[in-house]
Image (cartoon, rainbow, N blue to C red):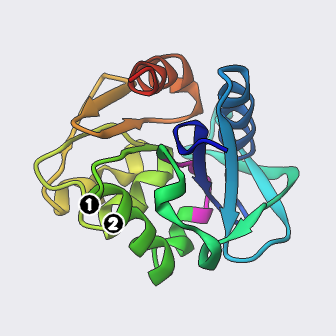
Amino acid sequence: MSTAKKILIITGDAGESFEILYASHRFREANFVPVIAAPAVKRMNLVIHDFEPGWDTYVERKGYLVESEISFDEVKTADYKALLIPGGRAPEYLRNDARVIQIVKEFAGNNKYIFAICHGVQILVTAGLVNNKKIACYEHVKFEVESCGGIYVSPDQAVQDGKIVTGKTWQSHPEFYTLVFNCMQG
């Protein structure tokens, strides 16, 4: 399998269903091979975050079940063209996993594309990759981004700054994936 065709997706339990499944399907449509990595090879419980009238924040519902294909210990960054970090609650705990931070730093150090959406940006923050970068993310991650030197963009739904592409939420998929697939053409 050509490295140029493989995309690594990092997630775990409580990853955002729509962001993971949409990405997997879109990459397959474009003849890329998405590979889902998680803390262990297992069936993961994903979630659905939605916005309900009258709520001050999003609501969370049980989402789909998805199998990870490899564990973080098995990731060889040289095998992949790019990295995608979806949101949900998974990034909240994955950012504390040294293996995840090492993977992300290797992608950055090898000048490969890194795509992050919604709460996935929390992992970029922990990896030290937002300083002086324009970043789109879920509005409640804005403080973390700005506290670490990032430039929160608003009202843009998605933004590219060098090899990093970020998006606000799953509602930003049209703008986010326009940038993602522009990057993947090279």
**Which portion, as a residue range, is magenta?**
83-90
Q: Which residue is mark 2?
A: 105
Seen in the image, is 104 located left or right of residue 12? left
Quadrant location of the C terminus? top left
Helix, strand or loop at label 2? It is: helix
Q: Quadrant of residue 15?
A: bottom right
- The question of residue 163 being in magenta is answered with no
Number of numbered labels in the structure image: 2
Compared with residue 51, is residue 150 higher up or lower down, i.e. above or below?
A: below
Compared with residue 174, is residue 144 higher up or lower down, i.e. above or below?
A: below
Q: Quadrant of residue 24?
A: top right
Q: Residue furthest front?
A: 1
Measured as percent of width and height from the top left, residue 110 is found at: 30, 56
Instruction: Measure the alpha-carbon separation of dots 1 and 2.
Output: 6 Å
Seen in the image, is 48 located left or right of residue 145? right
Quadrant location of the N terminus? top right
Helix, strand or loop at label 1? It is: helix
Name the one closer to the observer, 145 or 67: 67
Q: Amino acid at mark 2?
A: Lys
- Give the class, few, some or many, for how many residues have Cα within 10 Å of label 2's Cα (few <14, many ≥20): some
Circle number at residue 140 = none
Q: Nearer the viewer, mark 1 or mark 2?
A: 1
Measured as percent of width and height from the top left, residue 30 is found at: 65, 21
Measured as percent of width and height from the top left, residue 27 is found at: 65, 30
- The question of residue 84 being in magenta is answered with yes
Question: Residue at 41% across / 18% down in the picture?
Answer: 182
Name the one closer to the observer, 56 or 186: 186
**Tags 1 and 2 in contact by the CB under 8 Å rule?**
yes
Q: Which residue is mark 1?
A: 109
Question: Residue at 78% across / 61% down in the picture?
Answer: 68
